[in-house]
Image: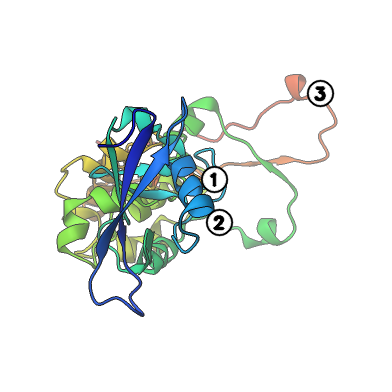
Amino acid sequence: MPRTNEIIFSIRRLYPAVDAVPHTQRFPVELHPGMTVLEGLLQIRESQDASLAWRFSCRMGVCGSCAMIVNGHPRLACNTQIQDVSREEVRLAPLANYPVIKDLVANLDTLFEQHAALAPYIARSDSAELIAPGGEFRQTPAQLTRFLQFSGCIKCGACMAACPTVASDTRFFGPMPLTAAHRYNADNRDDGFATRKRHMRQRHAAEHCHYAGECSRVCPKGVDPARALQLLRRELLLDWLGLRRRQALAMVQPASDDQPPSQRRVQTPPPFTVQR
Ligand code: SF4
Ligand code: FES
Protein backbone atom coordinates (compact mmCIF):
# COMPACT_ATOMS: atom_id res chain seq x y z
CA MET A 1 0.00 0.00 0.00
CA PRO A 2 1.33 3.49 -0.79
CA ARG A 3 1.81 5.98 2.07
CA THR A 4 -1.06 8.42 2.62
CA ASN A 5 0.62 11.22 0.67
CA GLU A 6 1.85 8.83 -1.98
CA ILE A 7 0.33 7.27 -5.06
CA ILE A 8 1.64 4.55 -7.35
CA PHE A 9 2.17 5.26 -11.05
CA SER A 10 2.03 1.97 -13.00
CA ILE A 11 3.52 2.75 -16.37
CA ARG A 12 3.52 0.53 -19.43
CA ARG A 13 7.05 0.58 -20.76
CA LEU A 14 8.42 -0.57 -24.07
CA TYR A 15 11.52 0.26 -26.03
CA PRO A 16 11.02 -1.69 -29.26
CA ALA A 17 14.72 -1.54 -30.11
CA VAL A 18 15.49 -3.53 -26.94
CA ASP A 19 12.30 -5.08 -25.50
CA ALA A 20 10.38 -7.90 -27.19
CA VAL A 21 7.26 -7.26 -25.13
CA PRO A 22 6.05 -4.37 -22.97
CA HIS A 23 6.26 -4.54 -19.20
CA THR A 24 4.74 -2.50 -16.37
CA GLN A 25 6.94 -0.55 -14.00
CA ARG A 26 5.64 0.90 -10.73
CA PHE A 27 6.85 4.19 -9.29
CA PRO A 28 5.80 5.82 -5.98
CA VAL A 29 4.93 9.48 -6.45
CA GLU A 30 4.66 12.03 -3.66
CA LEU A 31 1.29 13.74 -3.93
CA HIS A 32 0.58 17.45 -3.64
CA PRO A 33 -2.87 19.08 -3.74
CA GLY A 34 -3.99 19.74 -7.31
CA MET A 35 -1.13 17.73 -8.78
CA THR A 36 -1.55 16.64 -12.39
CA VAL A 37 -0.54 13.39 -14.04
CA LEU A 38 2.08 15.34 -16.00
CA GLU A 39 3.60 16.66 -12.76
CA GLY A 40 3.75 13.09 -11.45
CA LEU A 41 5.65 12.02 -14.56
CA LEU A 42 8.06 14.93 -14.19
CA GLN A 43 8.69 13.92 -10.58
CA ILE A 44 9.51 10.36 -11.67
CA ARG A 45 11.86 11.58 -14.36
CA GLU A 46 13.66 13.95 -12.02
CA SER A 47 14.00 11.67 -8.99
CA GLN A 48 13.72 8.05 -10.13
CA ASP A 49 14.14 7.27 -13.83
CA ALA A 50 15.35 9.81 -16.38
CA SER A 51 14.85 7.33 -19.23
CA LEU A 52 11.05 7.43 -19.03
CA ALA A 53 9.70 8.79 -22.34
CA TRP A 54 6.52 10.74 -23.03
CA ARG A 55 5.56 13.88 -24.95
CA PHE A 56 4.59 17.24 -23.50
CA SER A 57 5.11 20.87 -24.29
CA CYS A 58 2.66 23.57 -23.20
CA ARG A 59 1.56 22.06 -19.83
CA MET A 60 -1.78 23.85 -20.22
CA GLY A 61 -4.01 21.74 -22.49
CA VAL A 62 -3.21 23.63 -25.66
CA CYS A 63 -0.52 21.80 -27.66
CA GLY A 64 -2.17 18.36 -27.56
CA SER A 65 1.11 16.49 -27.21
CA CYS A 66 0.63 14.86 -23.78
CA ALA A 67 -2.39 12.67 -24.62
CA MET A 68 -2.09 9.15 -23.19
CA ILE A 69 -4.24 6.44 -21.68
CA VAL A 70 -4.88 7.25 -18.02
CA ASN A 71 -6.62 4.49 -16.06
CA GLY A 72 -8.13 3.14 -19.27
CA HIS A 73 -9.24 6.40 -20.87
CA PRO A 74 -7.49 8.75 -23.32
CA ARG A 75 -6.75 12.01 -21.50
CA LEU A 76 -4.32 14.93 -21.49
CA ALA A 77 -1.75 14.31 -18.74
CA CYS A 78 -1.37 18.03 -18.08
CA ASN A 79 -5.11 18.56 -17.83
CA THR A 80 -5.85 15.64 -15.52
CA GLN A 81 -5.59 16.00 -11.76
CA ILE A 82 -4.47 12.80 -10.05
CA GLN A 83 -7.17 13.10 -7.38
CA ASP A 84 -9.83 12.97 -10.12
CA VAL A 85 -8.48 9.65 -11.39
CA SER A 86 -7.62 7.54 -8.34
CA ARG A 87 -6.47 7.73 -4.71
CA GLU A 88 -4.22 4.67 -5.02
CA GLU A 89 -2.93 3.96 -8.51
CA VAL A 90 -2.53 5.82 -11.80
CA ARG A 91 -2.13 3.42 -14.72
CA LEU A 92 -0.53 4.94 -17.81
CA ALA A 93 -0.16 3.57 -21.34
CA PRO A 94 0.50 5.15 -24.74
CA LEU A 95 -2.42 6.14 -26.96
CA ALA A 96 -4.11 3.01 -28.29
CA ASN A 97 -4.39 2.11 -31.99
CA TYR A 98 -0.87 3.27 -32.87
CA PRO A 99 2.58 1.67 -32.75
CA VAL A 100 4.82 2.64 -29.86
CA ILE A 101 8.08 4.52 -30.32
CA LYS A 102 9.02 4.31 -26.66
CA ASP A 103 7.12 4.02 -23.35
CA LEU A 104 4.23 6.54 -23.56
CA VAL A 105 5.17 7.92 -26.98
CA ALA A 106 2.91 6.62 -29.75
CA ASN A 107 3.85 6.95 -33.40
CA LEU A 108 1.15 9.24 -34.84
CA ASP A 109 2.60 9.50 -38.37
CA THR A 110 -0.47 7.81 -39.91
CA LEU A 111 -2.79 10.20 -38.12
CA PHE A 112 -1.01 13.28 -39.45
CA GLU A 113 -0.69 11.83 -42.96
CA GLN A 114 -4.47 11.31 -43.02
CA HIS A 115 -4.95 14.80 -41.62
CA ALA A 116 -2.73 16.34 -44.32
CA ALA A 117 -4.47 14.37 -47.09
CA LEU A 118 -7.74 16.14 -46.29
CA ALA A 119 -6.29 19.60 -47.01
CA PRO A 120 -6.89 21.03 -43.50
CA TYR A 121 -6.60 24.67 -44.50
CA ILE A 122 -8.64 27.30 -46.30
CA ALA A 123 -8.51 26.59 -50.01
CA ARG A 124 -9.60 29.37 -52.37
CA SER A 125 -10.26 29.35 -56.08
CA ASP A 126 -9.36 33.04 -56.47
CA SER A 127 -5.60 32.55 -56.50
CA ALA A 128 -4.93 36.17 -57.52
CA GLU A 129 -6.34 37.35 -54.16
CA LEU A 130 -4.18 34.81 -52.34
CA ILE A 131 -1.02 35.88 -54.11
CA ALA A 132 -1.68 39.61 -53.72
CA PRO A 133 -4.18 40.06 -50.85
CA GLY A 134 -6.36 43.10 -51.32
CA GLY A 135 -8.24 43.04 -48.01
CA GLU A 136 -9.92 40.90 -45.40
CA PHE A 137 -12.32 38.00 -45.74
CA ARG A 138 -15.22 39.04 -43.51
CA GLN A 139 -17.67 36.67 -41.85
CA THR A 140 -20.89 37.17 -39.98
CA PRO A 141 -21.28 35.68 -36.47
CA ALA A 142 -23.66 33.09 -37.92
CA GLN A 143 -21.08 32.02 -40.49
CA LEU A 144 -18.47 31.74 -37.74
CA THR A 145 -20.78 29.59 -35.61
CA ARG A 146 -20.96 26.96 -38.35
CA PHE A 147 -17.38 25.83 -37.72
CA LEU A 148 -16.19 27.49 -34.49
CA GLN A 149 -16.66 24.47 -32.22
CA PHE A 150 -14.73 22.22 -34.59
CA SER A 151 -11.83 24.65 -34.85
CA GLY A 152 -11.01 24.03 -31.16
CA CYS A 153 -9.30 20.71 -32.00
CA ILE A 154 -5.73 20.56 -30.67
CA LYS A 155 -4.84 17.37 -32.63
CA CYS A 156 -4.13 15.41 -29.47
CA GLY A 157 -5.35 12.10 -30.93
CA ALA A 158 -7.42 11.13 -27.87
CA CYS A 159 -10.48 10.61 -30.06
CA MET A 160 -8.49 8.34 -32.39
CA ALA A 161 -7.38 6.18 -29.47
CA ALA A 162 -10.99 5.86 -28.24
CA CYS A 163 -12.57 5.09 -31.62
CA PRO A 164 -13.58 1.43 -32.09
CA THR A 165 -13.59 1.84 -35.87
CA VAL A 166 -9.98 3.06 -35.90
CA ALA A 167 -9.16 0.02 -33.73
CA SER A 168 -10.59 -2.38 -36.31
CA ASP A 169 -9.64 -0.56 -39.52
CA THR A 170 -6.21 1.03 -39.58
CA ARG A 171 -7.05 2.76 -42.88
CA PHE A 172 -10.09 4.53 -41.41
CA PHE A 173 -9.43 8.26 -41.44
CA GLY A 174 -11.02 8.62 -38.03
CA PRO A 175 -12.56 11.47 -36.04
CA MET A 176 -9.67 13.94 -35.90
CA PRO A 177 -8.87 14.24 -39.65
CA LEU A 178 -12.54 14.12 -40.66
CA THR A 179 -13.49 16.77 -38.11
CA ALA A 180 -10.75 18.99 -39.54
CA ALA A 181 -12.15 18.39 -43.03
CA HIS A 182 -15.63 19.39 -41.91
CA ARG A 183 -14.28 22.43 -40.07
CA TYR A 184 -12.97 23.80 -43.38
CA ASN A 185 -15.91 22.63 -45.50
CA ALA A 186 -18.19 24.59 -43.17
CA ASP A 187 -16.10 27.76 -43.42
CA ASN A 188 -17.48 30.14 -46.02
CA ARG A 189 -13.98 31.45 -46.76
CA ASP A 190 -13.13 27.99 -48.07
CA ASP A 191 -13.66 26.51 -51.49
CA GLY A 192 -11.96 23.14 -51.00
CA PHE A 193 -14.87 20.68 -50.69
CA ALA A 194 -14.24 19.26 -54.17
CA THR A 195 -10.53 18.78 -53.37
CA ARG A 196 -11.28 16.92 -50.13
CA LYS A 197 -14.12 14.87 -51.58
CA ARG A 198 -11.91 12.15 -53.06
CA HIS A 199 -10.69 11.17 -49.58
CA MET A 200 -13.86 12.02 -47.66
CA ARG A 201 -15.93 9.75 -49.88
CA GLN A 202 -13.74 6.66 -49.92
CA ARG A 203 -14.92 3.64 -47.91
CA HIS A 204 -12.44 4.17 -45.06
CA ALA A 205 -13.67 7.71 -44.40
CA ALA A 206 -16.86 9.37 -43.20
CA GLU A 207 -19.28 6.67 -44.27
CA HIS A 208 -17.37 4.09 -42.24
CA CYS A 209 -18.10 5.83 -38.93
CA HIS A 210 -20.29 3.59 -36.75
CA TYR A 211 -21.28 6.51 -34.54
CA ALA A 212 -20.09 4.93 -31.31
CA GLY A 213 -19.64 8.47 -29.97
CA GLU A 214 -16.54 7.61 -27.92
CA CYS A 215 -14.59 10.35 -29.70
CA SER A 216 -16.87 13.07 -28.36
CA ARG A 217 -16.94 11.53 -24.89
CA VAL A 218 -13.14 11.65 -24.47
CA CYS A 219 -12.37 14.88 -26.34
CA PRO A 220 -10.71 17.23 -23.82
CA LYS A 221 -11.70 20.35 -25.78
CA GLY A 222 -15.43 19.74 -26.29
CA VAL A 223 -15.02 19.58 -30.06
CA ASP A 224 -17.71 16.91 -30.57
CA PRO A 225 -16.11 15.08 -33.51
CA ALA A 226 -19.04 12.61 -33.67
CA ARG A 227 -21.32 15.52 -34.59
CA ALA A 228 -18.81 16.82 -37.14
CA LEU A 229 -18.74 13.42 -38.83
CA GLN A 230 -22.52 13.26 -39.06
CA LEU A 231 -22.64 16.76 -40.57
CA LEU A 232 -19.92 15.74 -43.00
CA ARG A 233 -21.87 12.64 -44.02
CA ARG A 234 -24.91 14.82 -44.60
CA GLU A 235 -22.93 17.14 -46.86
CA LEU A 236 -21.53 14.19 -48.80
CA LEU A 237 -25.00 12.71 -49.26
CA LEU A 238 -26.43 16.02 -50.46
CA ASP A 239 -23.50 16.34 -52.84
CA TRP A 240 -24.00 12.79 -54.16
CA LEU A 241 -27.69 13.55 -54.74
CA GLY A 242 -26.73 16.74 -56.54
CA LEU A 243 -28.52 18.83 -53.89
CA ARG A 244 -25.54 20.46 -52.20
CA ARG A 245 -25.05 24.05 -53.19
CA ARG A 246 -21.60 25.53 -53.01
CA GLN A 247 -21.23 28.11 -50.31
CA ALA A 248 -20.99 31.68 -51.42
CA LEU A 249 -17.36 32.55 -50.77
CA ALA A 250 -16.62 35.24 -48.23
CA MET A 251 -16.09 38.55 -49.99
CA VAL A 252 -13.02 40.69 -49.70
CA GLN A 253 -13.33 43.88 -47.70
CA PRO A 254 -10.78 46.31 -49.21
CA ALA A 255 -7.82 47.03 -46.94
CA SER A 256 -7.98 50.72 -47.88
CA ASP A 257 -11.14 51.18 -45.79
CA ASP A 258 -10.04 53.89 -43.33
CA GLN A 259 -13.30 54.13 -41.36
CA PRO A 260 -13.24 52.94 -37.74
CA PRO A 261 -14.27 49.25 -37.53
CA SER A 262 -17.62 50.10 -35.88
CA GLN A 263 -18.67 52.19 -38.91
CA ARG A 264 -17.40 49.94 -41.68
CA ARG A 265 -19.89 48.45 -44.02
CA VAL A 266 -19.32 44.71 -44.01
CA GLN A 267 -19.93 43.03 -47.31
CA THR A 268 -22.09 40.15 -46.25
CA PRO A 269 -22.04 37.29 -48.72
CA PRO A 270 -25.28 35.44 -49.38
CA PRO A 271 -25.95 32.92 -46.58
CA PHE A 272 -24.90 29.31 -47.02
CA THR A 273 -27.84 27.44 -48.41
CA VAL A 274 -28.49 23.76 -48.62
CA GLN A 275 -31.49 22.62 -50.60
CA ARG A 276 -33.46 20.15 -48.50
S1 SF4 B 1 -11.28 16.18 -31.74
FE1 SF4 B 1 -10.79 16.41 -29.53
S2 SF4 B 1 -9.90 14.43 -28.96
FE2 SF4 B 1 -9.84 14.51 -31.21
S3 SF4 B 1 -7.80 15.31 -31.70
FE3 SF4 B 1 -9.21 17.09 -31.59
S4 SF4 B 1 -9.06 17.84 -29.47
FE4 SF4 B 1 -8.17 15.77 -29.48
S1 FES C 1 1.44 19.51 -22.54
FE1 FES C 1 0.31 20.58 -24.09
S2 FES C 1 -1.68 19.70 -23.98
FE2 FES C 1 -0.59 18.76 -22.32
* Disc on the earlier residue, 2 or 3: 2
Q: Determine whether the residue tagged by mark 1 lies in a helix, strand or loop.
A: loop
Q: Which residue is mark 3?
A: 260
Q: x, y percentage for residue 94?
A: 32, 57
Give the distance between the C-alpha atoms of the residues marked 1 and 3, in whole angstroms: 23 Å
Asked if residue 254 lies left or right of residue 87, the reply is right
Give the distance between the C-alpha atoms of the residues marked 2 and 1, in whole angstroms: 7 Å
Where 120 sits versus 244, above or below?
Answer: below
The answer to which quarter of the image holds residue 9 is top left
Q: The C terminus is located in which quarter?
A: top left
As shown in the figure, which amino acid type bears the numbered disc 3?
Pro
Q: Which residue is mark 1?
A: 189
Where 62 sits versus 163, above or below?
Answer: above
Most extreme residue toward the top, as rendered?
Answer: 262
Q: Is mark 2 within 8 Å of ligand 1?
A: no
As shown in the figure, which amino acid type bears the numbered disc 1?
Arg
Q: x, y percentage for residue 54?
A: 44, 57
The answer to the question of whether label 2 and label 1 lie on touching residues, with beta carbons closer than 8 A, is yes
